[in-house]
Image (cartoon, helix red, strand yellow):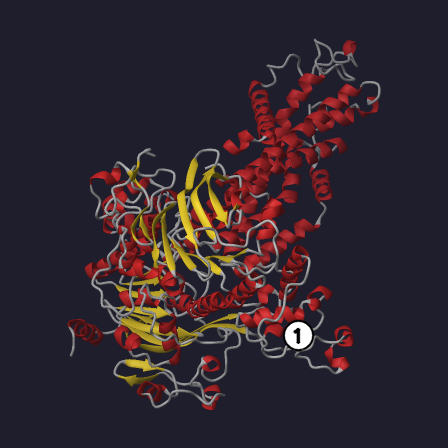
């Protein structure tokens, strides 16, 4: 199965690996080392992302979901982070073993990332057009040729203003004020493509948005610009770290449906990181539940919500207040998330688990399949454990 | 503590500060009796002696032991530096927090008064006041304080505005606390660390300016041992007997630098991001 | 069929309201530059809350729902006079408090308390828990007349924290525990009314349920009245007896929770409910999407503030601002076409 890329990368294979996944994380262990202590951020994390799949990584604070996202694109601050072991396989290439120069070629082109706060990801002194143009220019330089072509012919793109207009201003030259002015030369070069990109993310007035500065955009608009920037190159994988957490619920709904639409059209995969189970339910094909640095459950979305196997997943679902059901008291999970500096022995969830029994506080369970494509880390479901007691 | 101990400048700065303060206190408490020679003992037979084992820093034009004088001076300089900075800090805190918290007309009035004082070049203002009052150490302290407190007022006001926007201040108001309580128990403890860092770095500055005042002749008066005074008194002998001027100058420089380094590292210690690396 | 819940609601409603808000307005002036003020330009204001009226009955929870910019947080603060309103009247137990200032206002604080959103910033990191809890007590000089130690330990017990927490500092606790401390602080003077501004939004979901349950238990035990502000409709559904939906500084719909959520009368409410994700895989309910941007609080749209984004909008919507009308029993909304939309007679608007 071939994958579509925006640029060309000589070294990476373009065919999927034998397991039909585009990204496979294997036994990833990441620690944060400070002067006083070590915190285990990721503990033997394994997951797979298939082509055109939206996979949601769900977890609360400290579960390591952001660390996971950053590890894939090698953006972890190291120090204090230390990648102890593991592989992140993209095709046949281990991303962890790549040099920074090679990783830079992958970032943006093959794997893109968007973050929670769009305002801090956009440079406040440059206009939208200039930032998008920069992305395009980097891509051109990388691939050595222009790889853009209008894939779908839509509404005609407005003419960029003439030189006279730009120099004198529209009032003097008589041209229509609705067209943008004074964008720099580089921005004008990629004008068509930028307008097209903004239209794809459903920004209603792309021409005007191009000439705005980031602070003039609303949260939802800025996040859409980020998405536009991220998909400009048709990456194989888009990593979205809590992209809607800072948005209103109505805007969030818009952005989520936009992401789904983009996935359908571009066939990219999405790694969607969120703390909100309901958002995962809205958008994901698969759900990976994380807790205190470990993967607790990995299943399709139907399985996760209809047949949660891990007590934590079950607890999360039950403790979510619902709109349409009349509830008595809300079922809550007892206790607190463990201090990552002092992890409980055995299963990390055992102090809070209502099904806790004999082996749970002694041995540490491993991630095992319980049915096809559904993995759980819990003694209730499987006997297997990590014999090396940690 | 850890942040200080892991950085070279922090250690040096802290060391200098500790040595300085210890010397100053011991000099003051012992009334200079611990020194090898009395700082005032004039011995015309032993003038202009270069540094030797009996006189570590040599002797000056009046045969006084430079080493003893340099050490003795610590108490005067420390006194002036700490008194001026403390007074400015106290005044600045008071005015700045009230201005920042109350806002409105009170803030306007207080800050305009502050601006008036800031408008004068510091040294000139200090000179004018000192000359007017009469040149001696006490008057120097009185003269320097008006030069210094405006900066603290400004700093305190800015920090207060910051602290005021914190939820716990509003929570305190919601509990029904009076303004005075909030200022004393919430705002001031919150801004004090920043103010203290600034004050630490400032100690060196006051020291320098006071030495300058003495150098000009309106600060400490002879026969007092004070570094600035020592420099000016025998400055004409700079080339024949450089040690007389050298050691007091180095002392001023070292102490000022020391406090500056200490303050710098203290500021790092307060920065939550850097702190995070150490917890 | 009148359920038990409705009956008790009606009973409570028959009692006098504990809080009455009339036409509350809160505007923040935007400072003008010197040139602008010289040219007599009309000063612009941020119209955070632009004329809100409602009642709160004893022992009830009114949920205030809205997105960012709706004015819900500002409203919560204004009701408690933390940020006195620009105009309008607030009455607490028949006493007009919006006119009070200074000492007389301070004394009212014994009866009304506030719980903040962020437990990290609402507790002074330098204060031990004992001092945090003591603040309301010492503010009113009560430490002399009451057994203080007992009071403190009791309040901790009520929120599920051990008594030795008294000597600890906030950073030694987790987010959920800190919020419990904040709730204990709010309760210690036994107030009648508590305004909670997004009390669980900053907490992890597994802890959120614990805190919500705690709040409910406390309400039952002490007969508290809550004004519960949140952007999360699911949470408000669970906690509130009645809901008020805010948009651009005005209430667009208010009524019993069940009525508002199952039979929304205002187009915005329908959009809001439809946008809320649910942890279910039955995603067949058609999503009502809304386009456009949130209204500017400085220059809100003319007429009905929702009209630029409303699919039912007609020309009257941009010229006349609709009034809050009781369309169904105890269910109010401000929309020119509320009945027609509800009965299905109107499905789309002709535009502006």
Q: Quadrant of residue A351?
A: top left
Give the percent coordinates (x, y) of residue B228.
72, 29
Percent across and percent down for residue C73 are 41, 65
Give the image quarter of residue C269.
bottom left
Q: Is residue A275 left or right of residue A177?
A: left
Left or right, B48 with respect to B15, comes to right
Figure check: B68 above or below A342: above
Judge whether B29 appears above or below C346 on screen.
Answer: above
Q: Look at the picture and state if A103 lies above or below C268.
A: above
Which of the pair A189/B65 is nearer the observer? A189
Label 1 secondary element:
helix
Q: Nearer the viewer, residue A149 or A346?
A: A149
In the displayed structure, C209 sits above or below A348; it is: below
Which subunit holds the residue at mark 1?
A: C
Taking the image as shown, residue C247 lies to the left or right of residue C221, namely right
**Number of labelled discs?**
1
Q: Which residue is mark 1?
A: C38
Residue at 22% across, 58% down:
C217
Taking the spot 35% from the left edge, 45% from the top edge, the residue there is C173
Q: Nearer the viewer, residue A271 or B206?
A: A271
State the residue at coordinates (33%, 72%).
C91
Residue B44 in the image: state x and y as whole percent. Answer: 78, 12
Q: Residue A26: x and y, percent? A: 43, 44
Query: Could one spot residue C187 in this view of the protein?
Result: no
A299 or B259, which is in the foreground? A299
C45 to the left or right of B135:
left
Residue A321 location, quadrant: bottom left
Q: Quadrant of the C terminus of chain A?
A: top left
Q: Dot 1: few (<14), some (14–19), or many (≥20) neighbours within 10 Å?
A: few
Q: Is residue A159 visible?
A: yes
């Amino acid at each position: 199965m071939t994958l579509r890329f925006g640029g060309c990368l000589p070294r990476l294979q373009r065919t999927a690996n034998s397991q039909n996944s585009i990204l496979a994380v294997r036994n990833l262990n990441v620690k944060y080392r400070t002067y006083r202590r070590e915190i285990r951020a990721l503990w033997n994390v394994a997951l797979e992302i298939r082509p055109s799949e939206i996979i949601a990584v769900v977890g609360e604070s400290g579960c390591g979901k952001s660390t996971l996202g950053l590890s894939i694109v090698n953006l972890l601050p190291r120090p204090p982070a230390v990648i102890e072991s593991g592989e992140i396989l993209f095709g046949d290439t281990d991303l962890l073993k790549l040099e920074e120069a090679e990783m830079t070629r992958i970032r943006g082109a093959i794997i893109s990332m968007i973050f929670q706060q769009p305002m801090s990801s956009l440079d406040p002194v440059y206009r939208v057009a200039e930032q998008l143009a920069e992305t395009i220019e980097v891509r051109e330089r990388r691939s050595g040729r222009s790889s853009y072509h209008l894939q779908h012919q839509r509404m005609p793109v407005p003419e960029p203003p003439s030189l006279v207009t730009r120099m004198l201003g529209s009032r003097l030259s008589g041209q229509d004020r609705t067209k943008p002015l004074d964008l720099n030369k580089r921005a004008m070069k990629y004008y068509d493509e930028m307008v097209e990109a903004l239209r794809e993310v459903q920004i209603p007035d792309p021409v005007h948005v191009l000439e705005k500065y980031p602070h003039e955009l609303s949260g939802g608009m800025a996040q859409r610009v980020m998405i536009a920037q991220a998909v400009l190159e048709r990456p194989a994988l888009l990593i979205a770290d809590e992209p809607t957490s800072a948005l209103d619920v109505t805007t969030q709904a818009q952005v989520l449906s936009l992401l789904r639409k983009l996935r359908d059209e571009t066939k990219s995969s999405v790694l969607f990181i969120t703390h909100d189970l309901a958002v995962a339910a809205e958008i994901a094909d698969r759900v990976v539940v994380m807790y205190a640095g470990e993967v607790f459950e990995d299943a399709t979305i139907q399985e996760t919500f209809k047949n949660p196997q891990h007590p934590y997943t079950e607890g999360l679902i039950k403790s979510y207040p619902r709109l349409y059901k009349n509830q008595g008291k809300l079922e809550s999970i007892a206790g607190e998330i463990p201090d990552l500096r002092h992890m409980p022995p055995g299963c990390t969830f055992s102090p809070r688990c209502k099904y806790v029994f004999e082996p749970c506080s002694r041995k540490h369970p491993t991630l095992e399949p319980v049915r096809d494509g559904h993995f759980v880390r819990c003694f209730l479901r499987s006997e297997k454990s990590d014999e090396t007691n940690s | 503590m850890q942040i200080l101990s892991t950085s070279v400048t922090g250690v040096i700065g802290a060391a200098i500060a500790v040595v300085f303060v210890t010397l100053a206190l011991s000099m003051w408490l012992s009334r200079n009796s611990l020194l090898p020679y009395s700082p005032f003992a004039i011995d015309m037979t032993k003038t202009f002696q270069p540094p030797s084992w009996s006189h570590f820093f040599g002797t000056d034009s009046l045969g006084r032991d430079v080493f003893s004088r340099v050490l003795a001076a610590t108490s005067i300089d420390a006194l002036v530096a700490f008194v001026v900075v403390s007074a400015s800090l106290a005044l600045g805190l008071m005015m700045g927090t009230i201005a920042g918290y109350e806002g409105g007309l009170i803030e306007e009035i207080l800050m305009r008064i502050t601006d008036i004082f800031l408008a004068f070049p510091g040294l000139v203002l200090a000179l004018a006041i000192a000359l007017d009052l009469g040149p001696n150490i006490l008057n120097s302290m009185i003269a320097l304080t008006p030069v210094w407190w405006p900066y603290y007022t400004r700093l305190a006001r800015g920090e207060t505005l910051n602290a005021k926007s914190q939820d716990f201040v509003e929570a305190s108001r919601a509990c029904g606390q009076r303004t005075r309580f909030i200022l004393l128990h919430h705002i001031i403890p919150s801004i004090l660390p920043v103010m203290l860092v600034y004050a630490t770095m400032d100690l060196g500055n006051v020291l320098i300016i006071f030495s300058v005042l003495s150098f000009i002749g309106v600060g400490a008066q002879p026969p007092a041992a004070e570094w600035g005074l020592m420099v000016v008194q025998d400055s004409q002998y700079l080339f024949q007997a450089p040690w007389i001027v050298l050691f007091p100058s180095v002392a001023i420089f070292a102490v000022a630098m020391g406090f500056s380094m200490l303050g710098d590292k203290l500021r790092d210690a307060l920065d939550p991001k850097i702190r995070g690396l150490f917890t | 069929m009148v359920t038990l819940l409705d009956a008790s609601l009606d009973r409570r409603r028959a009692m006098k309201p504990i809080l009455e808000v009339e036409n509350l307005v809160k505007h923040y002036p935007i400072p003008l530059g010197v040139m602008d003020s010289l040219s007599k330009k009309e000063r612009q204001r941020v119209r955070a809350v632009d004329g809100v009226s409602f009642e709160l009955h004893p022992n009830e929870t009114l949920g205030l729902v809205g997105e960012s910019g709706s004015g819900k947080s500002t409203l919560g603060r204004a009701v408690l006079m933390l940020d006195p309103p620009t105009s309008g009247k607030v009455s607490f137990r028949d006493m007009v408090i919006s006119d009070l200032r200074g000492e007389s206002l301070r004394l009212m604080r014994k009866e009304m308390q506030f719980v903040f959103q962020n437990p990290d910033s609402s507790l002074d990191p330098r204060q031990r828990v004992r001092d945090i809890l003591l603040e309301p007590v010492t503010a009113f000089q009560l430490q002399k007349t009451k057994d203080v130690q007992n009071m403190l330990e009791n309040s901790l017990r009520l929120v599920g924290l051990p008594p030795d927490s008294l000597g600890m500092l906030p950073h030694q606790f987790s987010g959920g525990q800190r919020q419990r401390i904040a709730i204990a602080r709010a309760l210690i003077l036994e107030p009648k009314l508590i305004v909670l501004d997004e009390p669980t939004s900053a907490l992890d979901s597994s802890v959120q349920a614990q805190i919500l349950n705690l709040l409910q238990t406390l309400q039952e035990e002490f007969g508290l009245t809550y004004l519960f502000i949140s952007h999360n409709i699911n949470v408000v559904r669970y906690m509130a007896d009645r809901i008020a939906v805010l948009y651009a500084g005005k209430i667009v719909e208010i009524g019993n929770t069940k009525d508002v959520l199952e039979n929304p009368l205002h187009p915005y409410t329908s959009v809001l409910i439809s946008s809320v994700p649910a942890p279910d895989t039955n995603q067949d309910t058609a999503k009502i999407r809304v386009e456009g941007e949130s209204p500017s609080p400085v220059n809100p749209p003319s007429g009905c503030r929702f009209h630029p984004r409303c699919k039912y909008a007609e020309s009257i919507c941009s010229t006349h601002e609709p009034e809050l009308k009781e369309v169904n029993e105890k269910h109010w909304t401000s929309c020119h076409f509320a009945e027609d939309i509800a009965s299905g007679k109107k499905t789309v608007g002709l535009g502006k």
